[in-house]
Amino acid sequence: MGTISDLYVKEYEDNIAMGAQQLLSKFREKCDVKTGVVGKSKSFGFVEKGSARDKNARHSKVIHDDPNKIRCTAYLKYKYKSIIQDPDDDMKVLADIKSAYSRIPLAALNRAMDTALLEAARGTKYTGEDGTTSESLPSTSKVAVSTDGITLAKITSTLELFNDADVDENEPKFWAMGPQQLSDLLKLEKLTSADYNTLKTLVPGKIATFMGFNFIVTNLLAKTTTTRFNIAWAQSGLGLAIGQDITGKISELPEYHYAWGAYASMFIGATRIQDAKVVEIGCKEE
């Protein structure tokens, strides 16, 4: 029976690290990311906008305003993926360990990271000094499903919500949609040829910009009965806290007859930061 050499261990761990850097989750770089977090939680904050005052008299005193600071807390969770290959399996090509085995845990953790961000977008967020006040996504940040899938009207309504909230037009905005929503868009008769060609680039899974949104196709969006919940957000509207980035280990497991074990883990948390910068769009699916 062979043993795992230090070389293979090092190559596997390096492969995990490189994959985490180069094969990122779909949403990791599209939010406010805090790395090197110490502890079980991380606070994200912003200051609400204020109005300017008039100077109504000569030599009048300055009135100082105390800005309203909002604090949101992301609670970190340890997530992992572990796989083993039994000694009875084909072990002739050790290179499989550092290639195929590294991709399985990496893909699982990237999906877990994306899911955490999508759940935080429309789920409960925790505010206050101690991070214990729970808040739901308000109805003002939702576009109703009605009886339609995704439509141009829903996209324009979502954009209007961002504009009504004075979200900086230059801030990157993203839209997570399911495969059926992309199909629905491509069937719209009102699309111009330029619009159609832009959205067509999404078919192989690439990002396309349309009406100010960077559209991303994902299979991780929540669905209730026939409603698929799309999420649109401005980059500073969501926060991702990383206490431990994706890391990997490979070793022999004596308790499993010295099977080869590949393990990867991370310690992360996500939160919605600003309600006005996150919109849930209900889309009917057949």
Image (cartoon, rainbow, N blue to C red):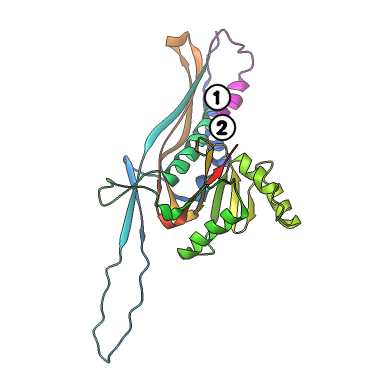
Label disc, if present, on residue 7 of the rendered structure: 1
Of residue 104 and residue 163, the one placed in the foreground of this image is 163
* Up/down of 67 relative to 215, above or below: below
Q: The magenta stretch spans which residues?
A: 86-104
Q: Secondary structure at mark 1?
A: helix
* Residue sitting at x 47%, y 33%: 247
Coordinates of residue 245 in the picture (x, y in percent):
45, 38
Nearer the N terminus, badge 2 or badge 1?
A: 1
**Category of crowding for the residue at label 1, using alpha-carbon neighbours closer than 10 angstroms: few (below 14), some (14–19), many (at least 20):** few
Q: Quadrant of residue 56?
A: bottom left
Coordinates of residue 237 in the picture (x, y in percent):
44, 54
Q: Amino acid at mark 2?
A: Asn
- What residue sits right under mark 2 in the picture? 15
**Does the image show residue 34?**
no
* Residue sitting at x 59%, y 52%: 214
Q: Residue furthest right?
A: 193
Q: Secondary structure at mark 2?
A: helix
* Residue sitting at x 36%, y 77%: 52
Coordinates of residue 126 in the picture (x, y in percent):
32, 47
* Up/down of 160 relative to 181, above or below: below
